[in-house]
Amino acid sequence: MSANTALTGFAAGIQYTGQAWPEFAQHAAQPVIAEGQSAISEINAQSVYQTLLGADALRYVTLQVCGAKGSGHPGGYASSAEAHAALMMLGHTNIVTEVGHHAPGFYAAMYLDGSLEEMGIRTMDDMMARFREKHGLLGHLSGAIPGLLAPAGPLGQGQHFAMAGALLHRDKLFPVTIGDGGMGEPYVLNSMMHFHTAFPEVTNFLPTLIWNGYSQEHHSMVSLMSNQQMTDYWKGHGFDEVVLVDAKAFDDSAQDGAYVDSSRFSHGQRLAFAEAVLRGVEHAASSAMGGKLTAFIIKQLKGSGVHTVGAKSHNLYPADTLDAEHIKAGLQRRALPAEAWPIVRANFQRAGGGPAVKTVVTEFEMALPALRLQMQEFAKGEKAVPATAMGALVAQVGQQDPRFIVTNADGNEASAMKNINDALKIRHPTTDPLYNQTPIGQVYEPLNEDACAGLASALSLFGSRALWLSYESFAINGWPIVQTVSQAMAELRRKTPSIVCMFTAGALEQGRNGWTHQRPEIENYFAGMMRNGNSFALFPCDANAIQAAYEYATNSVNKSMVIIASKSPLPVYMSLAEARDAVQKGAASIYESAAGDKGTVVFAVSGDMVLLPVFEAKDQLEADGWRVRIVAVLNPRQLYRPGDVAWDTVSQPDNAFMDDDHFHALFDGEVLLAVSGGPSAPLEPVLLRSRAQRRDTLCWKRGETTATAGEIMDFNGITAAAMVARIKA
């Protein structure tokens, strides 16, 4: 064993080297993946030997890079190392993960295959310097890291990216590693079961369960399951084939318990375990690519091969540095002979046809069919349903783009968007024309907002168009993955269609359903994200404006676009041309009095139905001698000052903020009243920039069961009388 070696090239900075393994010269004289090949040609003694070398290299790099910062998560990934190495050696490199805590291991793979050189990380020294640092390797995965397909943060999201990849690229396998710590979340398997029911022909994704017995700080909730129970659990969710490799069956070191550390086996048994994993992964991959829904499970103790085991291996703390004896000992146990590093690098660089940064599907922009949307011009003054007007455009997108998918948990028909179902059909195994059901439909309807948001977001991130529809009252159940993908899109080095959502503004429309359907507070979440730089909340004021908003959102790239609108017949205030201009600029006046000697009252309004009491108040104020201007705030993000928004930090930046002259022409007056049918946060940019000395807000307070929209607005104090009283006060 030696420290501070003179390794050069990409391996510079690797602190320890070890003695050559038995039969090293026989089995590792040359990389088993030959130049020009993309995978091992067969499973034999050499390929097994070098797979285990790769697994230990991944473990070593993971532990050293975490130790460099006394921070990060090595333990969970360590128990996946043989499976990850096997996938790569078999040429399957389009790998995603559900586990953000496996990030350092995935970075290790990208370091070893050379992908991180794209961001200037060429050596181990470079990697240590930039791990968990700004403009470096963040603590959880990001889709912006070269060679890595998707972000990983909250548990239960990774499978969506694998399913989206499989749907878009039927000729490639998309493994997704899943930790048993996250198996307490039922929607992981539930979402895959629904996807398989809807897309039974798409089986080229491979859930790979890392079953190590522990979660972040305790035993996993499935740690007491037997192998048969775990197999039955997966089969009960529609999996035809479950391949389980248990390290316990290879243990010759007399370890206690159901979970064992394979790194403590004799060298021969370590190779036997690695061979079983390699053969198991090969069989599982072949099964998945051959049309069977398949899962692979590797069972070994958390922390196998690093500094400690169990939940204690999960996270490093400030004292766990490279100078700490237990970290040094862990690295020394895993140290490879110097001659092993170029062998591992060559194998991993060649796997999959080249470094992941040059080969995985998300490193390329997907060609999209051109869209020609035919809009319906509604006359000013007539009544039209905004949701239905948008539905007609959604139908056109789906008819022109066969890959386009609409997701909805609560039903399009309930949101006055039945025209989507009529045109695109609900994807369902039961054919029934009455309900627009067909096995080849483009409308995906799991009764789970997480599954809806997950698939739509993943498709957008992977380069395809999609749309998530929901009530705003239920959207919070799926929103975290949209936020994750929005952040990933802000960092991407390529263009991809924006994630587009439309949430029915149910707060004012769902009186009879009561507060369960009246949760517009999520609009504050959207408003908070507008400062991110690539997040937009759109509030079209009528049926023409919603068409302009959907066109704007659908044609955008690398952004999060949320449209909030009603499903009730409402007056039309703007022409299509005016709406397009207003969506681009952020706001527009939809009414202004001819005269008034008391001064000007400006209403800044986000929403559509809430304009009804605003126009009532206008009549009363004009009668009292006020001049009234009603400004529809359609795209409040564009009303911020440039310095308020991180627009210059994101990919595909948009700095089309309204300048001061145009802003003040719209919003200057003696009194400014900001009015929203939801919360007030979307109107923050107006209140920040307004020069009105007297300004106030009227907005949502809380839900209640009512018979009409007027009654719920009255309960919240959003009435014409309240507006007039507030202005006079």
Image (tube, rainbow, N blue to C red):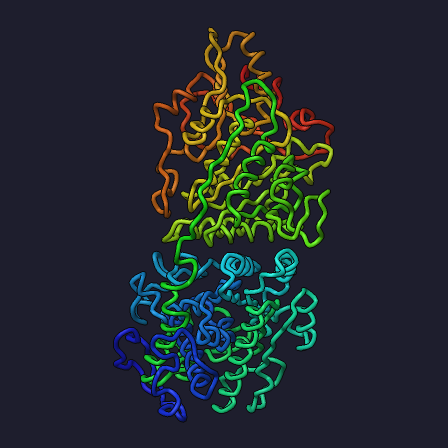
- Residue shown at 54% from the left, 39% from the top: 396
Residue 597 lies, with reference to residue 566, above or below; the image says above
Task: Give the quarter of the figure containing the C terminus.
Answer: top right
Residue 668 lies, with reference to residue 627, above or below; the image says below
Query: Toward the viewer: 492 or 575?
Result: 575
Position of 170 with respect to 643 (left or right) is: right
Position of 501 with respect to 144 (left or right) is: right
* x and y percentages locating residue 363 in the rendered image: 39, 58
* x and y percentages locating residue 707 in the rendered image: 74, 28
Query: Would you say residue 216 is visible in this rendering?
Result: no
* x and y percentages locating residue 239 in the rendered image: 65, 67
* x and y percentages locating residue 436 in the rendered image: 68, 44
Query: Would you say residue 638 is visible in this rendering?
Result: yes
Corner quadrant of residue 53? bottom left
Query: Toward the viewer: 10 or 278?
Result: 278
Query: Toward the viewer: 613 or 465?
Result: 465
Task: Give the quarter of the figure containing the N terminus.
Answer: bottom left
Position of 650 with respect to 280 (left or right) is: left
- Residue shown at 47% from the left, 27% from the top: 579
- Residue shown at 56% from the left, 78% from the top: 280
State how many labels appear.
0
- Residue shown at 66% from the left, 49% from the top: 438
Corner quadrant of residue 338? bottom left
